Image: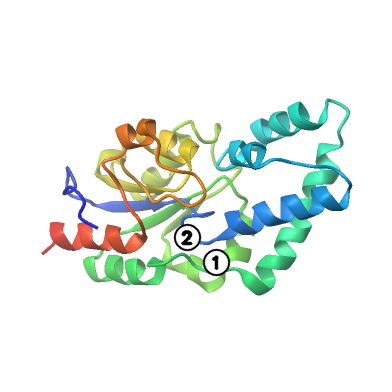
Amino acid sequence: MSLPPLPRRVEGVVFDMDGLLTDSERIFRDSMFAVTRRDGRDITMEVFLRMVGAPREQNQRVVLEHFGADFDYDAWIQAVNAHAHAQMAVDLQLKAGVVELLDDLDALGLPRAIATSSSHAAVERQLGDLAARFQAVVAHGDYARGKPNPDPFLTAASRLGVAPEACLGLEDSHNGVRAAHAAGLMTIMVPDLLEATEEMRGLCVAVAETLHDVRDLLAAQNG
């Protein structure tokens, strides 16, 4: 797909993880529905989508609004996570273009980081040896305020030693896009389970179909 050229020279790249590097959001979705049905309850796609890319506090609030204030959120989310982790062990896939984009960044000498709402343990579990290809991993606990606040991306840019405005921010969720934009990064949305709304298009320098489109943008800038 043809995208507009990047507005500034890219000196670093900050990646989200869930739904951007891996297809984990799909697995979490399926696990959430499976565990909830197993417990004799029902959850809607609307509820799930409100949780994508959101901090734990917001997710808990969304779930309690749906099931009621006396719902045991901690036990439920532990069961969902256990189900998802078991599925990831056998069915987790990288998103299209991940390895190729990392190869391109190596060739260009561009540093890169991960800025995720997930834990460091989740990064290790999902990415394994691939995590070593990032110069910095910023995960839950490394910043004061999670997405949609800019803190994760500002922390990642700082650890790379690159000004935020010289970083490319790659995201799939609405809260992630808001966070990257608020931090001043050149933000590209690569939609996974959430569509690119008019708000998202207004916050992004581009909306890409896959990370291969991001490769094309970098190649055009460095050609």
Question: Camera-side residue: 61 or 9?
Answer: 61
Question: Camera-side residue: 175 or 39?
Answer: 39
Give the amino acid type for the residue marked by disc 2 in the picture.
Answer: Leu
Seen at 55% across and 31% down, the residue is: 145
Question: Camera-side residue: 74 or 156?
Answer: 74
Quadrant in the picture for the C terminus: bottom left
Res 50 → quadrant? top right
Q: Is residue 79 visible?
A: no
Position of residue 206 measured from the top left corner of the image (x, y, whole percent): 27, 45
The residue carrying pointer 1 sits among few (fewer than 14), some (14 to 19) or many (20 or more) residues within 10 Å by Cα, namely: some
Position of residue 79 measured from the top left corner of the image (x, y, whole percent): 82, 52
Seen at 83% across and 25% down, the residue is: 69
Residue beneath label 1, please? 127
Pointers 2 and 1 in contact (C-beta within 8 Å): yes
Marking on residue 161: none
Give the amino acid type for the residue marked by disc 1 in the picture.
Answer: Leu
Q: Is residue 71 visible?
A: yes
Query: Left or right of 194: which side holds 45?
Result: right
Q: Secondary structure at mark 1?
A: helix
Residue beneath label 2, please? 21
